[in-house]
């Protein structure tokens, strides 16, 4: 497409800085190569063929998805090695079977004997089975089996007896998002690694082959120092980064590749507000920085080159109105941007902000839009 300037875009619009994105990708790929682990990028953040192709420049390779709709989309574009990284439920067996029939090697995960029993019943009913990873709880953050829990071996034994080999283990150190220092993230990365490797060792000692040992979070992937025993990493949000990641020092603000373009539509001088046409429908309601040392409101306001403007944040949001104000809340001397001024607002959480849009406007080095890349949302077609 012919490049167009930002002032010709109807706002709000989702912008993707291609140079920043590529820099983020290159850095992560080089890091994982040095650590000697395979890369199975998580595509739930980008949900875009063009972005995923840049993650895997040698052609369709292994990916991680969080919805079966993502698996459908990428299967249509030649991706056949897909990990569905949410514990399987029986109402998704038919969808998983359809993907299998299309030639996809779909790997499923589970973390309980109950789910293992449902999968075994499906095998008896249909004759189908899928590669299975057991999810390990490495940090008490979400789901998973504790690495030293008796249930881990019970699940493994049950699956093997049912004719469903345990393909491996996986974990996600989500608590790394709550760390307050790089040293704490490094410690979390070691804890993540130790937990999942320990789980794999126990399963192997009990008779499972367990060839896959999978970890995945952007903070731990960024600062891990030892991934011995790990076979793959599934990080995803590093492609764009966001204010939550910047708030825990996983990235710098000028690494954030995703922003929302908004336009000033009015003012409330008595409140120190500048109003823009991008509210919570444009930014999402995610307030992930609220618990961090620096609260960025609904987003950090930047000029069109992506440079932060005088401690200006989106301090409040209605459905289609964003309220820009000084971080301190001051009224006297608060910046009043003229009506018609365009700003770029950096998101708290790249996944949830991107989910509000059906396309990326790709911004080149000269600040012009050089391409439009489609993205998709939802759970089913």
Image: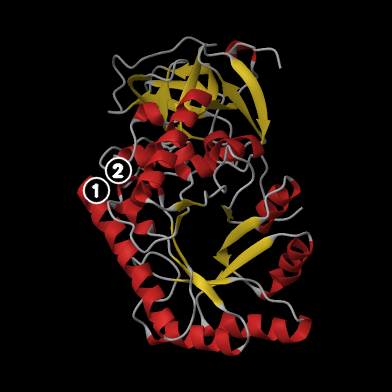
User: Can you give x and y, in whole percent of width and height, for residue 321 in the image?
Assistant: 54, 29
Tag count in the figure?
Answer: 2
Q: In the rendered structure, which disc, 1 or 2, sits on the residue that comes first in sequence?
A: 1
Residue 268, placed above or below residue 92: above
Q: Which residue is mark 2?
A: 248
Asked if disc 1 and disc 2 are in contact, CB closer than 8 Å, the reply is yes
Residue 181, placed above or below residue 260: below
User: Can you give x and y, in whole percent of width and height, for residue 102 in the image?
Assistant: 78, 59
* Callout 1 crowding tier (Cα within 10 Å): few <14, some 14–19, many ≥20: some
Determine the CA span between mark 1 and mark 2.
6 Å
Screen quadrant of the N terminus: top right
Tell me the tag on residue 157.
none
Position of 102 compared to 59: left or right? right
Position of 70 compared to 284: left or right? right
Relative to the observer, which residue lies in front, 258 or 124? 124
Q: Identify the secondary structure beneath mark 1.
A: loop
Q: Quadrant of residue 332?
A: top left
Q: Residue at x 48, y 69 (%)?
A: 211
Q: Quadrant of residue 175?
A: bottom left
User: Can you give x and y, in whole percent of width and height, for residue 81 in the image?
Assistant: 63, 57
Position of 48 compared to 340: left or right? right
Residue 174, placed above or below residue 308: below
Relative to the observer, which residue lies in front, 65 or 164? 164
Q: Quadrant of residue 246?
A: top left
Position of 356 compared to 323: left or right? right
Tell me the tag on residue 180.
1
Q: Is residue 376 visible?
A: yes
């Amino acid at each position: 497409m012919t490049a167009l300037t930002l002032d010709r875009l109807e706002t709000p619009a989702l912008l993707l800085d291609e140079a920043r994105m590529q820099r983020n990708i290159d850095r992560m790929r080089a890091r994982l190569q040095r650590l000697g682990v395979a890369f199975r990028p998580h595509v739930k953040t980008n949900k875009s063929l063009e972005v995923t192709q840049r993650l895997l420049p040698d052609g369709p390779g292994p990916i991680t998805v969080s919805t079966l709709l993502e698996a459908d989309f990428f299967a249509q574009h030649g991706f056949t090695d897909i990990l569905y990284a949410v514990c399987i439920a029986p109402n998704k067996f038919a969808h998983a079977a359809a993907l299998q029939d299309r030639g996809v090697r779909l790997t499923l995960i589970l973390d309980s004997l109950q789910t293992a029993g449902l999968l075994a019943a499906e095998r008896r009913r249909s004759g189908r089975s899928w590669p299975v990873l057991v999810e390990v709880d490495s940090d008490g953050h979400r789901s998973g089996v504790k690495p030293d829990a008796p249930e881990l071996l019970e699940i493994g034994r049950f699956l093997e007896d049912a004719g469903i080999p345990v393909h491996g283990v996986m974990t996600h150190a989500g608590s790394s998002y709550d760390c307050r220092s790089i040293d704490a993230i490094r410690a979390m990365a070691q804890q993540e690694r130790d937990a999942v490797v320990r789980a794999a060792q126990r399963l192997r000692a009990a008779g499972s082959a367990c060839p896959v040992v999978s970890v995945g979070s952007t903070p731990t992937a960024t600062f891990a120092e030892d991934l011995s025993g790990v076979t793959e990493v599934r990080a995803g949000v590093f492609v764009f980064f966001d204010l939550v990641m910047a708030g825990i020092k996983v990235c710098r603000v000028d690494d954030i590749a995703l922003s929302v373009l908004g336009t000033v539509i009015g003012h409330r001088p008595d409140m120190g507000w500048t109003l823009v046409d991008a509210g919570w429908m444009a930014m999402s309601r995610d307030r992930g920085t609220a618990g961090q040392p620096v609260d960025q409101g609904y987003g950090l306001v930047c000029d069109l080159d992506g440079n932060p403007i005088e401690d200006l944040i989106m301090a409040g949001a209605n459905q289609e109105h964003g309220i820009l104000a000084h971080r301190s809340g001051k009224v006297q001397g608060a910046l009043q941007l003229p009506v018609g001024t365009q700003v770029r607002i950096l998101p708290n959480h790249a996944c949830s902000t991107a989910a509000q849009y059906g396309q990326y406007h790709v911004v080149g080095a000269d600040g012009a839009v050089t391409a439009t890349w489609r993205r998709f949302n939802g759970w089913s077609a």
